Image: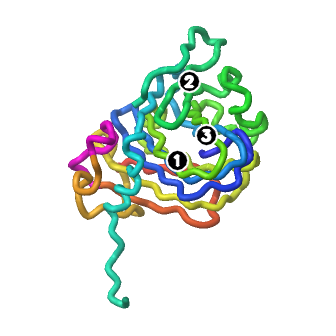
Amino acid sequence: MCCFSGPVKSVSATNIFARMESGERQLLVYRMSLETDKAVAMVLPLPVAKGSTEKALRFINLQKYPNFFDDLEVGFPAPVSHSANNDGPMTASKGFNETLTVYHVGDFEASFVPSVKDFDRLDKQFRLPPTAFKKLPGYKNFGFAVFKLKAGAQHVHPMAFEFRTDLPTRLFFPTVHIHDGQVHAEAEFDHKLYCQPSEVLQLKMADWEESPSLASKFMDVKKTGGIIVAEEHCYKHELRGMLPNRDTFAEART
C-alpha cells in the first residue's frame, strides 16, 4: 500500500524489492518517481507482528546506492530480437504519548508508526486522512513506515528497512494506491517487483522471471548492507495498467 498524506500530481516508475531475512523479519526496498506541489509523507502500511513496538522496524540507508534498482534491472536482459544506514535518531521518544522517533535516512526523515492509534504521535501534516482506515479495515493491525518527501519533481533514492512480519510464509509487497485521498477499486499500476527466495522461505515463482545469473554478477552487494544475497538468483514480476487496487504477495512453496 503506497499512500500519501496529501494530494500529489503524479507517481510513476515504482520499484519494490523484498526478501525474508529470517522466519520473522522481512526486508523491503522501495523507490518511485514523484511530483508534488508541497511536502508530503509517503506511508507504507506493513503487516507487522502483533504487539510490535517502535523497535519492530529498522531503517537502512541506501543513499550511497541510488542505482540499486537500475543494477537489479541489469540482471534481467531483454530477449534478443531476431526481427530487428540508518544514521541514527534525530529525536528521542521517551513515552507512549510523546512524539515518535524521527530518523535521518539518507535524503529522508522517516518514522515508524507501530499502529493506527499511534498516528496521533506524528506531525499533523504527515498523517493520513482520518477516513482512510474506515475504507481499509484490513489494515487496522498494521504498522506504518513514514517517509517525509520534499515538494517538487523528484526521483527519490531507494527507501529501505526490515520489519518483524506477521506473515512468515508470505512475502509482502505494498501495492495498494491512495494518491488522492480516495480508495479506488482499481488503480493504474506502473510497478516492477523484485525478490529473492531465502533458506527460511522458498517461494512459488511460476509467474516471475528469473535472472540468468547470480546477484553478485550485477549488484554491488556490499552497498546493499545485507539486503541482497550474492549467491542467489533474483526474480522479477511487472504490474502494468488498470488492475485491482490491492497489495501483492509471493506465497511459500508447499
* Left or right of 86 in this view: 224: left
**Residue on which disc 1 sits:** 156
Q: Residue at x 23, y 60 (%)?
A: 213
Identity of the residue furthest to the top in this view: 94
Residue type at tag 1: Val
Q: Which residues are magenta?
A: 221-233
**Residue on which disc 3 sits:** 149
> Percent x, y for residue 13?
54, 58
User: Per the image, is 33 magenta?
Assistant: no
Q: Residue at x 43, y 26 (%)?
A: 87
Q: Say what secondary structure mark 3 lies in.
A: strand
Label 3 to label 1: alpha-carbon separation = 9 Å
From the viewer's side, name the closer residue of 134 and 215.
Answer: 215
From the viewer's side, name the closer residue of 192 and 102.
Answer: 102
Residue type at tag 2: Val
Q: Is residue 68 above or below residue 85?
A: below
Q: Residue at x 46, y 45 (%)?
A: 158
Q: Identify the mark at residue 102; answer none if there is no mark.
A: 2
Label 3 to label 2: alpha-carbon separation = 13 Å
Residues tagged 3 and 1 counted as in contact (Cβ below 8 A): yes
Please report whichever mark, 1 or 2, sits nearer to the chain's N-terminal start. 2
Q: Residue at x 37, y 55 (%)?
A: 204
